[in-house]
Amino acid sequence: MEWMNFLVVMGCLLLIYGIIAVAYNVQYGYTKMVNFGTVAWFAIGAYTYAILTTHPPLPEDFYRFGFGFPILVGIIGAGIVSGLVAYLIGLPILKLKGHYFAIVTFAFAEILRHMLINEKWLTNGTVGFFALRQPWVNLMSANAYTYFSFFLMVVALLLTYFLLNKICKAPFGRVLKGIRENDTVCLFLGKKVPSFKMKAFVITSIFMGIAGSLYASMYMTLVTPSMFTSMVSFLVLFAVVVGGKGNNKGAILGMFLLMFVDQFTRFIEVPTSFAVRMSSIRGIIYGLLLVMVLRFLPQGIIKEKKVIYPEGR
Amino acid sequence: MVARLIQHILFGTVTGSILVLASLGFTMVERLDNFVNISHGQLLAIGAYFMLLFYNILGWGFIISVVLTVFLTALMGLLVYKVFFKPILHFGTVTLIITSAGVGTILNGAIEYIGGPDAHALNLPIFKIIKIGGFSLISKDYFGIIIVGIISIVIIQLFLQKTKMGKAFRAVSSNRSLAETKGINLGSLSTLIWLLAGGTAGLAGILLGVVGSLTPDMGWNQTMFIMSVAVLGGLGNIYGIMIASFIVGLTMDVGILIFPSGYKPALAFAIIIIALLIKPEGIFEE
């Protein structure tokens, strides 16, 4: 049954990434904020969780802060800090145009990664934090725990999906779509565009942070800077663009596709000369898929439904 | 102490010279087709790897390797344009940027597949170090890079001011539709600009091979620095880019006298953020 176990573990990762993808979809699909630094908020969530819940520093550790708080504090804290950082960064950044916003968010994510490596007093450098506590792990066997965490992740993803979907179907979501299509008109209509953008940005960042804390605690049980490269941002972007932007089912579909390609390329029988270079081939496949979808199916696989609103408010 | 500072200033100028070549192509494309081509850094890597192929693996002469590399990288640039970008030019900036991210990933994967995940080095002969008054300043090949940078700037200047195509480019970049009505042939201009972009990137890649080693990820690393230069200089402002390249180069190489050396790339990114906060249009007006 190991392959079943393996599938479940894979599924956990997919669900975590799914949370990020759905949140990212609200940023990009609904509001057209092209954020190339998604991994930054993921990392902030994960590291905040680690710092909040790990034990106080021993003499041989580099870091200075370890609070040993309970797990729930860690998860909530991760969300709050992510949201806070989003707010602080968003203040100067959100008013930038499309390509500048993309560049700056990318730069922010890279600077963050360098800080994670260099600021040892906070993050323990390249060693990172390990042996992070998983919720309720003592209550059951390791095998059962895998399924339990899968179940928890499903709940988390469903919660995220429903919450964000509700926000998007509500008038708030309509304004976001309006901003995407033409923000000048929205301003004209009296909507406070910057405030809406900031709200969307902060709320989605909170979800990304929580996803990061789940990643750190249940899936990996450790955090190191090398886990948070720009490839993560790219994968999320890929999932949302290919799956279908502007609708949350598409984001989840995109994630499935991504994981499928990933696993497929790991396990098919190929001559050994290919196998060694599989990671580069995988990159080529992702890139090609993205480019082709953008060219031929620019809306993604699941298109956004055109909503006809009834007359009146 | 002063000698060390001068050394670092010279290194910064070397980095700046390479960045000028790298960023010129990037910015010309942005001016022409109005999108940020994130895959541009991969063309540098392609240039570097071509040079590896011709000079190291096949053992051909230095000059012939350089010429072939620049030529082939220029063609690659054009190929990338024709295959990936030209068909979707009317899809909008955001789609083009994301496509360029995809193209960058494809090229990166291809480079890693062909070149292997390990680092390589161009085995150039060791050049003598120029000394002044007993202090060793800089080696001759690095100095040569600065010369190449200066010559390139001059050539580009001449191209833009004196040649017909150069003027056409300037016309298109300031007002595309007006230029079209004047009968400027966009097709051949695009071809030329993309060839130039590829060629300058190839040359920059070779120079990168001179100062450092070749890794499959160098493309993404360089893209970051290029973006930093482009934002500082003003996306699309050729002269701003030239100045900004040296500012970024100097900041990085002199900055590590103050900050820990692990932060060197982060300095480039910090420049982006500071520049955009102070003046979102870029420091230099277009």
Image (spheres, coloured by chain):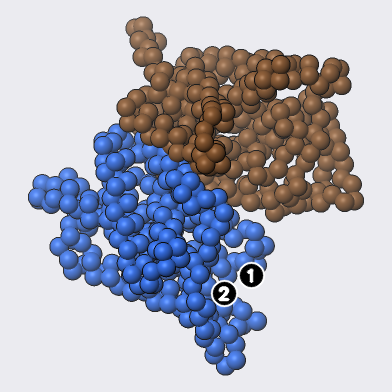
Chain colours: A brown, B blue
> Would you say residue A261 is visible in this rendering?
yes
Q: Where is residue B172 in the image (x, y as percent from the top left)?
A: 20, 52
Q: Mark 1 points at which residue?
A: B257
Label whose residue precedes the other's in the sequence (1 or 2): 2
Q: Label 1 amino acid? A: Leu
| Quadrant of the rendered image containing residue A284 | top left
Q: Where is residue A290 in the image (x, y as percent from the top left)?
A: 41, 32
Does residue A3 lie above or below A197 as drawn? above
Q: Which chain carries label 2?
A: B
Q: Position of residue B224 (x, y in %)?
A: 49, 52
Using the image as rendered, state which of residue A268 and residue B262 is in the foreground: A268
Does residue B118 lie above or below A26 as drawn? below
Disc 1 is placed on an element classified as loop
Name the side, left or right, on which B281 lies relative to A53.
Answer: left
Disc 2 is placed on an element classified as helix
Does residue A35 lie above or below A250 as drawn? below
> Would you say residue A90 is visible in this rendering?
no
Q: Label 2 amino acid? A: His
Using the image as rendered, state which of residue B26 and residue B208 is in the foreground: B208
Using the image as rendered, state which of residue A164 and residue A46 is in the foreground: A46
Using the image as rendered, state which of residue A186 and residue B35 is in the foreground: B35
Name the side, left or right, on which B234 lies relative to A63.
Answer: left
Q: Name the residue under label 2.
A: B8
Are dots 1 and 2 in contact, CB under 8 Å? Answer: yes
Q: Distance between the residues labelled 1 and 2?
A: 8 Å
Please rate how many residues cluster around mark 2, counting C-alpha atoms within 10 Å: few if below 14, some from 14 to 19, many from 20: many
Name the side, left or right, on which A42 lies relative to A290.
Answer: right
Q: Which chain carries label 1?
A: B
Q: Where is residue A265 in the image (x, y as percent from the top left)?
A: 53, 31
Residue at image position (78%, 19%) is: A143
Does residue B173 lie above or below A148 as drawn? below
